[in-house]
């Protein structure tokens, strides 16, 4: 296992939604903040990679959420780069509430992108050495994301805005979760919270593009049982898939 | 002048845009965070007001920006409730960079809303006493916002999303500035930064509504002179005006 690194964060009002808990988009942003601080301290941050024409891209997240951090709550976020193989690095994040109880576990997989060739690059020991990650041949297998048939008429369009993009001119990954869950609507989003999220990123989305967000709500026997929703972000013509996800929801 | 209150804030990656500086939306959210902490400490926060069926609404902001806080920078935000009259409370915010230099001055005016009648309520001494604000008959006059004729075809529509709304089920005021500036486009927003912003809020916008954002760019003699843009947020049919603003931009 890798070196652990911990930051504290007080959830701001602007990071929460109507429920008074942090949004999925901001939950992920806060987790990534912890990993950025760790990589910067070890001189393995973006400036180091950019010199080599490289950058990290996130390929998958898997979140187990017992409770969402509340607005005003100060949480601790611990991160570690657990292991790596030739093409992927795996990083875990644990979020602890004010009583020290683990409330969120995020597992993530990153790949290296060569900006010139736009192809994935080898993960070299120099890049990961400071993190004490385990070098392994094993791939971390995330649970599968089941495909579903989209109903073209039910897509909700979103235009990529200037403030959705990051310094690489692509959409910040955390944004996809907002596009995926917004179409569920207020009644749903105030009745349930995401208990398990599994999202896979397929392609980057650039400024000015328009995407469609599709979801399918899977019926349950009664309102008390967990609800599972499936999500897909596609191009307007549905020919390109940018991301897919599966979310299990529980009653708030 | 009122009691001063200061918080520190490290600008997160997710609060910045492509330029690596904080967005206007997040700049305002961080300022409001300081005032919320002060009012909570003095037991004059939202729970206190809600017991009386009241809530603050922001009517106008005026921002003088010398430099925008950068991602990774830790800034200090000082706030004070400077004065009040029967209908308005005025609050100033100063933001200081890491060298202690004042880089942003925000002046704001708040009114009290009675949630039952949806009308403005009197500002009573009990509500403002702990802040040592000056009781005055004077109204703080913000510079006027000039009207402009909108070109109906040029409106950019925005649908109010679940994550745009706050715990009062209305759009967070800071969001208006994102809707106003996004239509200026990437070339503009990477070439200029907002040096002076003057925004007046006319009406609240609720979840599910769709609005139009209009702007007018005022030509200047050459590219080096400051550029002034005018902004208006209206209902889809342009019959209702939700907010108007005027922004002076400088070369980055």
Image (tube, coloured by chain):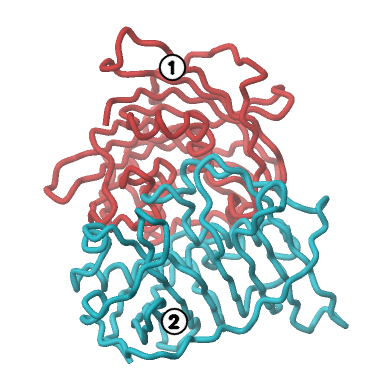
Chain colours: A cyan, B red
Residue positioned 43% across, 37% down in the render? B89
Q: What is the number of callouts on the image?
A: 2
Query: Is residue A191 at least partly visible in the picture?
Result: yes
Which residue does the numbered mark 2 point to in the structure image? A97
Label 1 vs label 2, nearer the camera: 2
Residue B88 position within the rendered picture, expressed as x and y whole percent measured from the top left: 46, 34
Residue B161 position within the rendered picture, expressed as x and y whole percent measured from the top left: 64, 49
Q: Is residue B224 above or below residue A20?
A: above
Q: Secondary structure at mark 1?
A: loop
Depth order, front residue of B212/A198 = A198
Q: Secondary structure at mark 2?
A: loop
- Local crowd at mark 1 within 10 Å, few (<14), some, or many (≥20)? few
Depth order, front residue of B52/B248 = B248
Q: Which mark is residue B144?
A: 1
Residue positioned 46% across, 77% down in the render? A108
Residue positioned 64% across, 70% down in the render? A245
């Amino acid at each position: 296992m890798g070196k652990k690194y911990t930051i504290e964060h007080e959830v701001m009002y602007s990071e929460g939604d109507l429920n008074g808990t942090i949004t999925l988009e901001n939950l992920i942003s806060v987790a990534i903040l912890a990993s950025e601080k760790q990589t910067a301290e070890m001189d393995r941050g973006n400036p180091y990679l950019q010199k080599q024409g490289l950058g990290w891209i996130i390929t998958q997240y898997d979140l187990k959420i017992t409770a969402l951090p509340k607005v005003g709550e100060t949480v601790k976020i611990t991160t570690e780069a657990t292991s790596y193989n030739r093409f992927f690095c795996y990083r875990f994040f644990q979020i602890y509430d004010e009583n020290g109880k683990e409330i969120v576990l995020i597992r993530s997989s990153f790949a290296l992108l060569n900006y010139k060739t736009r192809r994935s690059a080898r993960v070299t020991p120099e890049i990961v050495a400071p993190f004490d990650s385990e070098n392994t041949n094993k791939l971390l297998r995330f649970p599968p994301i089941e495909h579903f048939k989209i109903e073209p008429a039910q897509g909700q369009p979103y235009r990529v805005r200037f403030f959705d993009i990051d310094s690489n001119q692509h959409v910040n990954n955390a944004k996809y979760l907002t596009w995926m869950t917004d179409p569920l609507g207020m009644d749903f989003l105030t009745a349930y919270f995401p208990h398990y999220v599994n999202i896979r990123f397929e392609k980057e989305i650039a400024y000015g593009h328009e995407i469609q967000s599709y979801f399918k709500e899977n019926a349950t026997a009664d309102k008390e049982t967990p609800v599972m929703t499936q999500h897909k972000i596609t191009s307007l013509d549905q020919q390109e898939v940018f991301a897919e996800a599966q979310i299990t929801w529980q009653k708030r």
